[in-house]
Amino acid sequence: MPKFVDPSPPGHCIFCRLVAGEIPAARVAEDALTIAFMDLGQVNPGHVLVATRRHAENLYDVTPEEAGAALKMAQRVALAVRDVFAPPGLTILQANGREGDQTVMHFHLHVVPRHADDGIALSWPRKEPPADILHDYAARLRAKLPAS
């Protein structure tokens, strides 16, 4: 099945239109900062999207409060998915940018129930750089971390 790519023109984001009630959605839950709704693609039964109400393109653009609210909502949804669909596993996925496989340029999380042999592949080759390289990466990242 081909990937969905939001065909909306700039300024008319499909998730913003959904939040505004301009297009229908099977809404699961809402709060002041987020909305959870069924993914039309249903990778597996119970696949839910959690999006911010305010338009923010990706993780780099959400506020810390929105990021926290989105993860809190994803956990609430995951608990309900577990109780309703009883999947043996669950994946939370958040993508940023086209190269990161983001297809709708509005911050969102996927809550995906998982089953053995469900055809979903989330794997990549391990590169295992030497420890000194890992320590260098960590030091460089620490130097750029925003204050918490």
Image: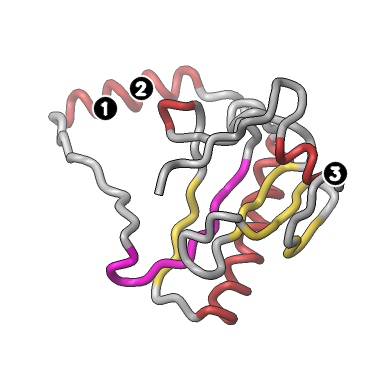
Residue type at numbered disc 3: Glu
Residue identifier under label 2: 139
Q: CB of mark 2 within 8 Å of CB of mark 1?
A: yes
Numbered mark located on residue 135 in the image: 1
Residue at figure coordinates x 63%, y 37% from the top left: 107
Task: Measure how far apart labels 2 and 1 are at the Cα level.
Answer: 6 Å
Q: Secondary structure at mark 1?
A: helix
Q: Is residue 16 left or right of residue 99?
A: right
Going from N to C along the chain, the mark reached first, 3 or 2, is 3
From mark 1 to mark 3, how far is it between C-alphas? 49 Å
Above or below, 114 against 55 in this view is below
- Amino acid type, mark 2: Ala
Residue at disc 3, secondary structure:
loop
Indicate whether residue 113 is drawn in magenta: yes
Q: Could you say where residue 86 lies in the image, as x and y percent from the top left?
A: 49, 81
**In the rendered image, which residue does mark 3 sit on?**
22
Query: Quarter-wise, where is residue 73 in the image?
Result: bottom right
Give the extent of the magenta segment: 108-118
Could you say where residue 142 lies in the image, as x and y percent from the top left? Answer: 44, 24
